[in-house]
Image (cartoon, rainbow, N blue to C red):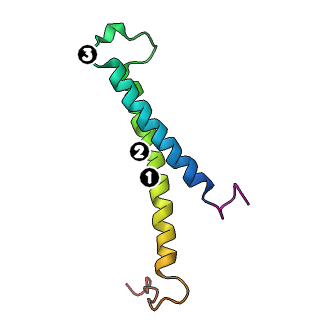
């Protein structure tokens, strides 16, 4: 089940997307460094591009981190562990 919920496929894709977005952010910032905004030839402002890249990197990184934390929960309370599940309803 390559693309299902039992594999880490989507988390790996999200980590790669995060890295690519971060590298693109560095590339764009180096490209526009010390240049006037009038020299920007695209339809979007540099601020828009930087914001989109930063948001993409942040959100895909959070997807990966949340999956890892969720998996760590099951490892922490795994089979053979002496830790008991917390009683959430009595809290």
Residue sitting at x 43%, y 82%: 88
Residue sitting at x 66%, y 64%: 6
Instruction: State left or right for residue 14 relative to residue 34.
Output: right
Residue 89's quadrant in the figure? bottom left
**Can you say which quadrant of the picture contains the C terminus?**
bottom left
Residue farthest right in this picture = 1
| Residue ID for mark 3 | 34
**Coordinates of residue 43 in the picture (x, y in percent):** 46, 14
Badge 2 marks a residue whose secondary structure is helix
Badge 1 marks a residue whose secondary structure is helix
Eye-nearest disc, 2 or 3: 3
**Coordinates of residue 48 in the picture (x, y in percent):** 39, 25
| Residue ID for mark 2 | 58
| Residue ID for mark 1 | 62
Q: Quick check: marks 3 and 1 in contact, CB under 8 Å?
A: no
Q: Residues within 10 Å of mark 3 (few under 14, many from 20)?
A: few
């Amino acid at each position: 089940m390559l693309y299902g919920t039992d594999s880490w496929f989507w988390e790996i894709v999200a980590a790669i997307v995060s890295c690519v977005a971060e590298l693109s952010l560095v590339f764009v910032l180096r490209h526009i460094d010390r240049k006037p905004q009038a020299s920007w030839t695209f339809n979007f402002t540099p601020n828009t591009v930087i914001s989109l890249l930063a948001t993409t990197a942040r959100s895909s990184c959070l997807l990966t981190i949340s999956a890892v934390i969720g998996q760590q929960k099951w490892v922490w309370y795994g089979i053979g562990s002496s830790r008991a599940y917390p009683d959430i309803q009595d809290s």
